[in-house]
Image (tube, helix red, strand yellow):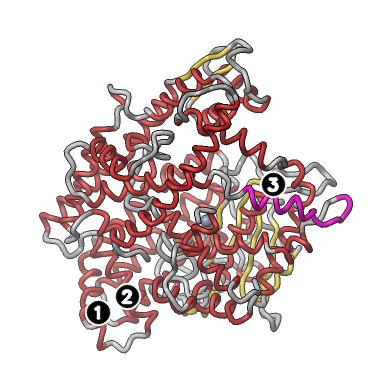
């Protein structure tokens, strides 16, 4: 322990049970100092590696990089856990300081020329170094990371790249702010019962609250926030108001003036294309996809176009059903985009008459969690044992030891299920500590994964059981699937541990796990009424499952059209007029006039507010192809817990992290590449 970090030992040196931090000693006021000390320690380690006297070897360069920054990872893990799951004003203020500091820290490392020279020389000699498959992957990922940030470019190109990145960051921020500004500036205030026809109570309450915020006390406001506009389009009986609101909603970012995003999009695409070409790629999509499972724009477009054909067919059938319903109501106009949600909801109510309230008594949190553990036991032979002598970061957090068949502890799992004001919304998995087998400077030999799940389920009142909606239950399985990816990890190097995989592969372990929630053996045992103990009636369950494919044509067309426009933008190079490209793509697809893209270009935040999902919006569907195809491997055997398939799944998906190429490892599990057929069956498209 260096003397500077000794001060912050409770943050950096964890000596609680099973290697957990002693959360009770973590003090918010220590974070700022601990970050500075840990950043400094990491810088010193990086310098020592880069300036080492000996010739570069895998051990003195790559292994050294892998174990460097241990203190920084620990401080960061504790801090980002708090920032997400249990924040306060002090943590929030610090967050604004830490985020840019971290980004500067890592970009400095990626610009370290001496360090890159060592990695590059190892890469050149990779065939003769006697590396294992995992080591070769780890080396490749470090090397590619540098190359993709421009390490191989001449000075002037590096400078140009830095300027491009900076301008892109600014454009991304501006894009998001413009959408937000357009969302905020539009409202439609309603006050009469005629105007509110069809609007249910929950939505009236929300609209009343929105009106109050806008200074229209006592009235009801339609705003462009998804939680108001979507239910309004669904329930309002006033076609004229639906049309007006819909048009405002889809023109966000394209209203002219200061907040218009069309020029921002054009400039963004120009710069992305220039960046890709500087780095030696044909276009930005090729650059983005290079380190994914899909690998090429062609592979992505093939999938999307195959799905498109089926989706648009199915949407046509759905439209005919809606049109018939409209005629019954006496309206003879065509189905327009502002009609779809409204009539689809009416049709849903006719076809599947059940409510969430009927399901909830059968979905007790504790029982569904048991089901989650039972599935893991049947598939992977592990057990979860709750420990009660650990104080975590909040009294609601529960801690479990995960044991293998011999009673050996293989992971620690923390579960933080209930909503509270100090927690951000949504659900996620993260880790305090990732699994690996390296010897650390502290002398520790490898590390147990310490993984946590955070959800936002409603906390029951004292003495009542927590009841979940079906969506909540799915979320629990989904996040636990991610947790298993971390907990079953069995690799040597931390950077390829658990969820350290590409964006189009990372949702496979989680989405796949959701399938076991609705396996009959599981529901019969665990979906029990909280008062009577009776299992959920089969008729109710069947209806719930059948309703899942309702409106699938519409959902798939909305999504796939957006994904195809994203791909077009990032493969066509410099485009004169992005809106013309959008129209062109939609026209060539034969986009039905009864629907629109899920995200039109001027407010397509996934791909223009930062480049997180640019040339990447497809990856949601890619993961779905994988999970449906993977679950079919079990179904084909007639046993959802088939031990041979489960063993292959563990060996090739849940335990290997990023240590093997995604395509290779998927083929090792499945014996073939995934086909989209299972996904299309699951969606009800074929
Ligand atoms: Zn997920």
Dot 2 and dot 3 residues touching (CB under 8 Å): no
Task: Residue 480: name its quadrant.
Answer: bottom right
Of mark 1 and mark 3, the one earlier in the sequence is 1
Of mark 1 and mark 2, the one earlier in the sequence is 1
* Distance between mark 1 and mark 2 Cα atoms: 8 Å
Of mark 2 and mark 3, the one earlier in the sequence is 2
Dot 1 and dot 3 residues touching (CB under 8 Å): no
Report the number of discs.
3
- Determine if residue 492 is in view: no
Q: Residue at x 25, y 69 (%)?
A: 115
* Distance between mark 1 and mark 3 Cα atoms: 53 Å
The residue under label 3 is: 469
> Is 492 or 529 nearer to us in this picture?
529
Residue 541 x %, y %: 72, 53
Task: Residue 297: name its quadrant.
Answer: bottom left
Q: On residue 122, which mark appears?
A: 1
SS state under label 3? loop
> Is 454 or 592 nearer to us in this picture?
592
413 above or below 332? below
Label 2 crowd (10 A; few <14 / some 14-19 / many >=20): many
Q: Residue at x 17, y 61 (%)?
A: 280
Dot 1 and dot 2 residues touching (CB under 8 Å): yes
Residue farthest to the right, as pictured: 532
Label 1 crowd (10 A; few <14 / some 14-19 / many >=20): many
Mark 2 or 3, closer to the camera: 3
Q: Is residue 641 left or right of residue 241?
A: right
SS state under label 2? helix
- Determine if residue 650 is in view: yes
Q: On residue 436, which mark appears?
A: none
Read off the magenta span.
531-547
The residue under label 2 is: 139
């Amino acid at each position: 322990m260096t003397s500077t970090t000794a001060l912050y030992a409770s943050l950096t040196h964890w000596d609680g049970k099973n290697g957990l931090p002693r959360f009770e000693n973590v003090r918010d006021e220590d974070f700022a100092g601990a970050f500075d000390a840990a950043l400094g320690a990491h810088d010193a380690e990086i310098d020592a590696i880069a300036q080492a006297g000996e010739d570069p070897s895998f051990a003195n360069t790559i292994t050294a990089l892998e174990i460097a920054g241990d203190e920084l990872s620990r401080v960061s893990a504790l801090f980002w856990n708090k920032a997400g799951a249990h924040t306060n004003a002090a943590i929030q203020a610090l967050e604004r300081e830490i985020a840019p500091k971290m980004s500067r820290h890592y970009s400095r490392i990626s610009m370290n020329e001496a360090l890159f020279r060592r990695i590059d020389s190892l890469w050149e000699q990779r065939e003769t170094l006697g590396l294992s498959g995992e080591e070769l992957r780890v080396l490749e990922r470090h090397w590619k990371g540098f190359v993709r940030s421009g390490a191989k470019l001449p000075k002037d190109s590096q400078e140009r790249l830095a300027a491009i990145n900076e301008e892109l960051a600014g454009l991304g921020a501006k894009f998001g702010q413009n959408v937000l500004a357009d969302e905020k500036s539009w409202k439609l205030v309603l006050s009469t019962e005629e105007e509110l026809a069809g609007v249910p109570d929950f939505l009236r309450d929300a609209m009343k609250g929105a009106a109050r915020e806008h200074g229209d006390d006592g009235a009801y406001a339609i705003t462009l926030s998804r939680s108001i506009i979507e239910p309004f389009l669904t329930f309002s009986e006033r076609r004229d108001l639906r049309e007006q609101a819909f048009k405002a909603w889809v023109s966000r970012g394209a209203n002219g003036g200061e907040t218009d995003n069309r020029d921002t999009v054009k400039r963004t695409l120009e710069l992305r294309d220039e960046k890709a070409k500087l780095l030696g790629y044909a276009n930005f999509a090729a650059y983005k996809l290079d380190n994914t499972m899909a690998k090429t724009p062609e592979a992505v477009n093939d999938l999307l176009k195959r799905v498109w054909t089926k989706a648009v067919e199915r949407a046509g059938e759905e439209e005919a059903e809606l049109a018939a319903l409209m005629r019954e109501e006496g309206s003879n106009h065509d189905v327009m985009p502002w009609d779809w949600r409204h009539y689809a909801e009416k049709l849903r109510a006719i076809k599947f008459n059940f409510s969430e309230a009927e399901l909830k008594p059968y979905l007790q949190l504790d029982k569904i969690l048991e089901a989650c553990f039972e599935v893991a036991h049947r598939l992977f032979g592990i057990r979860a044992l709750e420990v009660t002598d650990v104080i975590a970061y909040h009294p609601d957090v529960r801690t479990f030891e995960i044991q293998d068949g011999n009673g050996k502890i293989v992971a620690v799992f923390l579960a933080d299920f209930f909503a509270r004001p100090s927690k951000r919304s949504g659900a996620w998995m993260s880790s305090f500590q990732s699994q690996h087998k390296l010897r650390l400077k502290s002398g520790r030999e490898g590390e147990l994964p310490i993984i946590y799940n955070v959800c936002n389920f409603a906390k029951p009142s004292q003495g009542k059981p927590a009841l979940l909606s079906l969506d909540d239950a799915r979320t629990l399985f989904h996040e636990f699937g991610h947790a298993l990816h971390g907990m079953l990890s069995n690799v040597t190097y931390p950077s390829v541990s658990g969820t350290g995989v590409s964006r189009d592969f990372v949702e496979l372990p989680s989405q796949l796990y959701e399938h076991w929630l609705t396996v009959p053996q599981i529901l019969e045992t665990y979906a029990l009424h909280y008062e009577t103990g009776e299992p959920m009636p089969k008729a109710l369950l069947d209806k719930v499952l059948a309703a899942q494919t309702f409106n699938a044509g519409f959902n798939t067309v909305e999504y796939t059209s957006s994904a195809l426009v994203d791909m077009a933008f990032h493969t066509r190079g410099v485009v004169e007029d992005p809106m013309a490209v959008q129209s062109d793509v939609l026209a060539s697809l034969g986009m039905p006039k009864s629907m629109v893209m899920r995200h039109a270009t001027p407010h397509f935040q996934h791909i223009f507010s930062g480049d997180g999902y640019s040339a990447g919006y497809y990856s949601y569907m890619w993961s779905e192809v994988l999970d449906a195809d993977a679950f079919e491997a079990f179904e084909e055997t007639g046993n959802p817990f088939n031990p041979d398939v489960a063993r292959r799944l563990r060996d090739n998906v849940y335990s290997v992290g990023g240590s093997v190429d995604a395509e290779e490892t998927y083929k090792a599990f499945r014996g073939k590449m995934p086909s989209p057929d299972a996904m299309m069956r699951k969606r009800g498209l074929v």
